[in-house]
Image (cartoon, rainbow, N blue to C red):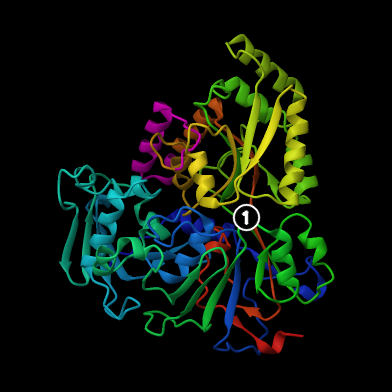
Amino acid sequence: MKGFQTLFGVILGLFLMGWIMAGCSGPEEAAHPGNEPESAAPVHGGIYRMPLWNNPETLDPARVKDQYGAAVVRQVFEGLVRFDSYLTVLPALARTWQVEAEGRVYRFTLRENARFHNGDPVTAADVVFSISRRLRLNPAPSVLPHLMKITGAEAFRSQDQDRVEGLTVIDPHTVEIRLVSPHMPLLTALGMHEVAILPQKIVEDSTSEFARHPLGTGPFRFVKWDPDRSIDLERFDGYFGEPALLEGIHFKIYAGGQDPAVLADFQHRKIDEMAVYGDVREKLADQADVQWFHRPSLSLFFYGMNCDHPHLTHPEFRKALSAAIDRTAFVAQVYNGQFDIARTILPPGMPGYSPASPLPDNDPDLARQHLDQALADGLDQVPELELVSAFQTSRVAAEMEMIKAFWAKLGVGVRVRYITDWAEFETYIRSDAVQLYRYAWFADMPDPDSILHPLFASGSPNNFMQYHDPVTDDLLRQARETIDPLARAEVYQKAEAQITASLPLVPLFYMSVDRVYQPDVRGIQVSALGAHAMPLNQVWLDPSAMP
């Protein structure tokens, strides 16, 4: 077997090693993730209780576009490959793979003991079906551009052919993928939850039901979904890998955020973990036995701007909005200094990241110059803007007040609209009516393509900003075909420079993975992709750690 893994995954994993902070000495005393007492031995059993800050739109992994659904499908499904906590590509349903023809042919050998949750074996035909299905989905999944490099993918998506020429079943446990040209992100992309392997017969017989009652190959299988309340999973004893230590997982849904409710439930030990934002750290300071976890993540929090909206068509006006914000004060006052301010699109630690040409920050004079230029170029008047948020909490309210104050200095008024149903929110930001929207993007894989292509490529289903630029598109295509990692990073830097020259979004800060866990939680292995991407099969509950 000629093994193949991304160099980026190895380097990035070494760079982003995080830490878990033991509770007895407060958040200043650090230890490594999963660093249990020497005498601790894993205990089987128990239900892990995890919060979801919104109701998933679907549990069909190919259609999941939010963290809430991703957190669930990561436990229920497996792909051909997976990432470890250091973002190295490892075998999953494929036990081995070979790369041939200078990166144009991939041959995967499946595990013979891999089973779906109904007991059916995983076959090469299921793999071909799963990948082929992604090619015809609408709206297109964010992984689609990677899959379109497969020979015959375009003809299949346009329905000119009834099969994908580049997907071949060699035997029941071997599948071959042939590409039209080398495509560096492919193997990494196959670790995304969108490319999980599905049971062909079950999906074909019940596509609509599958999104509500998923059936996968992961360490946990689906039990029930009570919308806006909870989702329950149970251990799958037929899992091909190490069986889960937990008996099951209970996802409690807090539709629309409900930060106070989440905090209260954690303090009363009704949930086992929660994200740490704003003043949560201070409110939990007296609970000395909890565990604190911090790690940089490959993510960006930003305000997206609809470049096709009459109020936001002028790049100079968009630059004025960005330059007027004091990001340091913004993060310090709203988020207690928890995050690093963002003056680039690619986050630190991502290949291609460069701080050499940061965006202006807290520069009222420059913001006024940009605004004057926009007015000179044809902006009729300074408009009132609508900023839409999927969350309505006290923290978001404080954030909105600061943004209003920054932009008021330019004479720009802001009205805030809250759409707390996630599906309704995403429908709205896809519409022509949206002006600005509040959003966070987490990379699905340790590759610059995972941020730049979904957000900025023409025709991308996540390009809610309606940013269209042929130069950017050409650079993104060029980067995907560049084999040398240093040359590839340079192409992505050029693409980012091209995007920031137009500035279809306002970068605000790079998000980190900040979570707090109950004292009995063991086996935490969060990667820079975020807590929602962490498999829970090696997490266990230590009864001796509870007070």
Quadrant of the snapshot with the N terminus = bottom left
The residue pinned by badge 1 equals 256
Q: Is residue 543 above or below residue 298?
A: below
Front residue of this view, candidates 73 and 1? 73
**Does the magenta run of residues contain 197?**
no
Look at the image and tell me whether residue 358 can be seen: no
Residue depicted at 43% across the width and 31% down the height: 472
The residue most toward the right is: 286
The residue most toward the top is: 376
Left or right side of 139 for 429: right
Left or right side of 281 for 420: left
The spot of residue 76 in percent (x, y) is 43, 71
Badge 1 marks a residue whose secondary structure is loop
Residue depicted at 63% across the width and 71% down the height: 33
Front residue of this view, candidates 325 and 51? 51
Q: In this view, does 494 lie above or below 218?
A: above
The spot of residue 188 in percent (x, y) is 40, 56
> Is disc 1 surrounded by few (<14), some (14 to 19) or many (20+) residues within 10 Å?
many
Q: In this view, does 114 lie above or below 365?
A: below
Front residue of this view, candidates 166 and 126? 126
Q: Give the range drawn in magenta.
A: 462-488
As shown in the figure, which amino acid type bears the numbered disc 1? Gly
**Does the magenta run of residues contain 466?**
yes
Residue 17 lies in quadrant: bottom right
